[in-house]
Image (cartoon, rainbow, N blue to C red):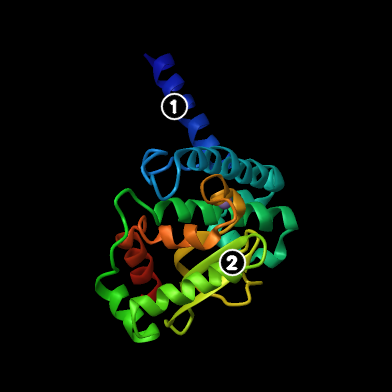
């Protein structure tokens, strides 16, 4: 009996230690099936994008932080102080945050129009939802090379559209326009090329059909607190 008790405690102890010390980042499961966003985002793209690209950012981030104190931080905290870190952390930490955000901002049978507080804020800061769509599409289309387009809440609580290069994001202390993401789209070619080839604007238009507005509203509410 005594042996059993010690054995249990010991197992628990090891598990706890692992939790504390081995805070490796993990690839989050997709919140829907890889074919859930068809026909707007195709199954093959989702499989490769999530299973290969995002996995690579996670693995490379873990390798870049191995043995450092930063292993215990959240990816958001790492992004907020990204100027302290080497390029491998900026690229892969950004990649991990951005993709984790991106999967959840989409859903099957999404789209429609924003509602609630976010809809009011869009009307207040952009005049209309159509105007926001126009500015967002322009930011996505004109981001040269690889990057992301965003709708963010800035420090003064206003909404803004911006874009970032590579795997940078608006949380980063080095970002040209800083804020908390409410909506974001990956405009790297790997995000759309299999289905849309060079037609990035068509992919950006299709994105409006898969947006999870409840999730966007949740980000907005948290950011204005
Ligand atoms: Mn990507």
* 7 left or right of 209 in image: right
Looking at the image, is 156 positioned above or below residue 173? below
Residue 192 position within the rendered picture, expressed as x and y whole percent measured from the top left: 54, 51
* 77 left or right of 130 in image: right
Distance between mark 1 and mark 2 Cα atoms = 38 Å
State the residue position of label 2.
80
Residue 86 position within the rendered picture, expressed as x and y whole percent measured from the top left: 75, 58
Q: Please tell me the numbered disc located at residue 139.
A: none
Q: Is residue 23 visible?
A: no
Q: Please tell me the numbered disc located at residue 9.
A: 1
Residue behind label 2 places its C-beta within 8 angstroms of ligand 1: no
* 56 left or right of 224 in image: right
Looking at the image, is 85 positioned above or below residue 4? below
Quick one: quadrant of the N terminus? top left
Mark 2 element type: helix
Which callout, 1 or 2, points to the residue nearer the camera? Answer: 2
Instruction: Please report the residue visible at 41 percent of the width from the left and 76 percent of the height from the top.
Output: 132
């Amino acid at each position: 009996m005594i042996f059993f008790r010690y054995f249990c405690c010991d197992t628990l102890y090891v598990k706890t230690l692992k939790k504390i010390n081995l805070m490796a980042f993990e690839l989050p499961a997709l919140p829907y099936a890889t074919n859930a966003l068809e026909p707007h985002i195709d199954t093959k793209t989702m499989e490769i994008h999530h299973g290969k690209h995002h996995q690579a950012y996670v693995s490379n981030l873990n390798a870049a932080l191995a043995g450092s104190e930063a292993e215990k931080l959240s990816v958001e905290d790492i992004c907020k102080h990204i100027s302290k870190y080497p390029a491998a952390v900026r690229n892969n930490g950004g990649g991990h945050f951005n993709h984790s955000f991106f999967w959840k901002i989409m859903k099957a049978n999404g789209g429609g129009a924003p509602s609630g507080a976010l809809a009011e804020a869009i009307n207040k800061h952009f005049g209309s939802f159509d105007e926001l769509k126009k500015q967002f599409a322009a930011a996505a289309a004109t981001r040269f090379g690889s990057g992301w387009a965003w709708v963010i809440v800035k420090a003064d609580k206003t909404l803004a559209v911006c874009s970032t290069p590579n795997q940078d994001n608006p949380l980063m202390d080095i970002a040209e326009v800083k804020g908390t993401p409410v909506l974001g789209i990956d405009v790297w070619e790997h995000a759309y090329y299999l289905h849309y080839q060079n037609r990035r604007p068509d992919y950006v238009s299709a994105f409006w059909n898969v947006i999870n507005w409840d999730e966007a509203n949740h980000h907005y509410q948290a950011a204005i607190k």
